[in-house]
Image (spheres, helix red, strand yellow):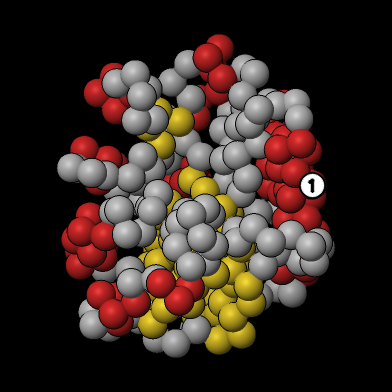
Amino acid sequence: MKIASFNINGVKARLPRLLEWLDICEADVVCLQELKSMDDSFPRLEFEDRGWHLETHGQKGFNGVALFSREPLQDVRRGLPGNDSDEQARYIEGTHKGVRIACLYLPNGNPAPGPKYDYKLAWMERLRKRATELFNSEQPTVITGDFNVIPTEKDCYDPAAWLNDALFLPQTRAAFQTLLYQGWTDAIRQIHPQGDCFTFWDYQRGSWEKDNGIRIDHFLLSPQAADRLQDAGIDRAQRGKEKASDHVPVWVTLSD
């Protein structure tokens, strides 16, 4: 089973690039973030005509997550538990062939300190609680998406440039490590322990051309899923295409 994740940065703006990539990615499940589209205006036909089953959780102009699958997903749930008043569309779950898959778009949190950073940390605490429930279920589980977290210095082209950024603050990294301490496996680092493994290059300041990237798109695997991990990778070439997203797809393959 191949599961891929891609922050598309506007599904309508990137539609040609997304369709091209979907035609070659050979994934069974695709997790998308930052759709910037409502459910009722999502361009469903372009994907359904290619054989995809869609589950979306959209929001006008901001956020939005989706699960695409080759077979219908089971037990789809929208929204991260823990705050019934939270209207931001950042989380969706579904089950594919016995594997629970959670797709997230974690808040950026800038500027920090401030209300947006407080929301980020509170969201991460809610995620920790949901991750605990998923972990304790002992079902093979994958949590993936744009975490907006730079876990370590080697995941950033220049740590000094990010010291005061919400993606790299000590509290942010500590909250991410708390997830790993539960027993989740960082699949990209499991397969590629060395190197930068960047997944995001800003549109500004020639970041792509200079390779000034960061790693913020992750796959966390429960022990039952990690036991089935065969490979993981990053489709870096997608960033160099015309009108590309500022993120690139990441993926894992699990044995049957």
Nearer to the camera, 129 or 203:
203
Q: x, y percentage for residue 76?
A: 59, 80
Q: Is residue 17 visible in this depiction of the protein? A: yes
Residue at 56% from the left image edge and 20% from the top image edge? 162
Quarter of the picture containing the N terminus is bottom left
Whether 48 is drawn above or below 27: the answer is: below
Nearer to the camera, 153 or 54:
54
Q: Quadrant of residue 169?
A: top right
Tell me if mark 1 has few (under 14), some (14-19) or many (20+) residues whose alpha carbon lies within 10 angstroms of its own.
some
Whether 25 is drawn above or below 183: the answer is: below
Q: Is residue 232 visible in this depiction of the protein? A: no
Quarter of the picture containing the C terminus is bottom left
Q: Quadrant of residue 254?
A: bottom left
Q: x, y percentage for residue 35?
A: 44, 59
Question: How many labels, in total?
Answer: 1
Q: Quadrant of residue 19?
A: bottom left
Residue at 23% from the left image edge and 44% from the top image edge? 243
Q: Is residue 200 left or right of residue 111?
A: left
Residue at 54% from the left image edge and 62% from the top image edge? 59
Q: Amino acid at mark 1?
A: Ala
Q: Quickly name the residue at label 1.
A: 122
Q: x, y percentage for residue 248?
A: 35, 46
Q: Secondary structure at mark 1?
A: helix
Nearer to the camera, 104 or 43:
43
Residue at 45% from the left image edge and 76% from the top image edge? 40
